[in-house]
Image (spheres, rainbow, N blue to C red):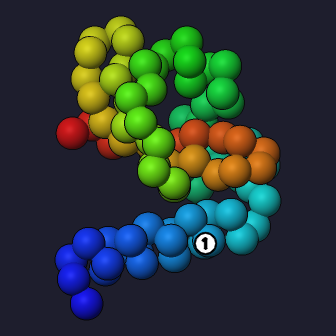
Amino acid sequence: MTDRTEAETIRRVMTQSINAVEGSREYLEAKHGQVWNTSELQQEFSVESFLSPFVLAKRKCDGIRGTLKFQHSPRFYFSFEPE
């Protein structure tokens, strides 16, 4: 198995895991800390790309790039990790 295939497999498993249980905002905040809905994300970040379950974004207040995770429904973003 190539590194790329392994990475794709890991990404798909993570996506399935995140979306297996519909997490409310309160649930996600308790588990991951700060959570953003789509409009809040757009206010605080410039989104550069999506590759489920990840978003590559730049925080507007200080220009720091990083990744966030997201669940599909309801759509919430969480776990910002600076590069």
In the figure, is residue 10 to the left or right of 64? right
Q: Residue 25 in the image: state x and y as whole percent.
A: 73, 42
> Which image quadrant is residue 76 in?
top right
Q: Residue 77 in the image: state x and y as whole percent.
A: 58, 40
Question: Considering only vertical position in the picture, is 27 above or below 19?
Answer: above
In the figure, is residue 26 to the left or right of 15? right
**Nearest to the observer: residue 51 or residue 81:** 51
> Which image quadrant is residue 82 in?
top left
Number of disc labels: 1
In the figure, is residue 59 to the left or right of 62? right
**Nearest to the observer: residue 61 or residue 47:** 47
Residue 33 seen in this snapshot: no
User: Where is the N terminus found, in terms of image quarters?
Assistant: bottom left
In the figure, is residue 7 to the left or right of 20? left
Question: Considering only vertical position in the picture, is 76 above or below 11?
Answer: above
Q: Residue 9 in the image: state x and y as whole percent.
A: 42, 78
**Nearest to the observer: residue 50 or residue 38:** 50
- Taking the spot 27% from the left edge, 29% from the top edge, the residue there is 65
- The residue to which callout 1 is attached is 17
Q: Residues within 10 Å of mark 1 (few under 14, many from 20)?
A: few
Q: Amino acid at mark 1?
A: Ser
- Taking the spot 35% from the left edge, 9% from the top edge, the residue there is 61
Residue 9 seen in this snapshot: yes
Look at the numbered disc 1 and give the secondary structure of its residue. helix
- Taking the spot 38% from the left edge, 12% from the top edge, the residue there is 60
Q: Residue 78 in the image: state x and y as whole percent.
A: 53, 42
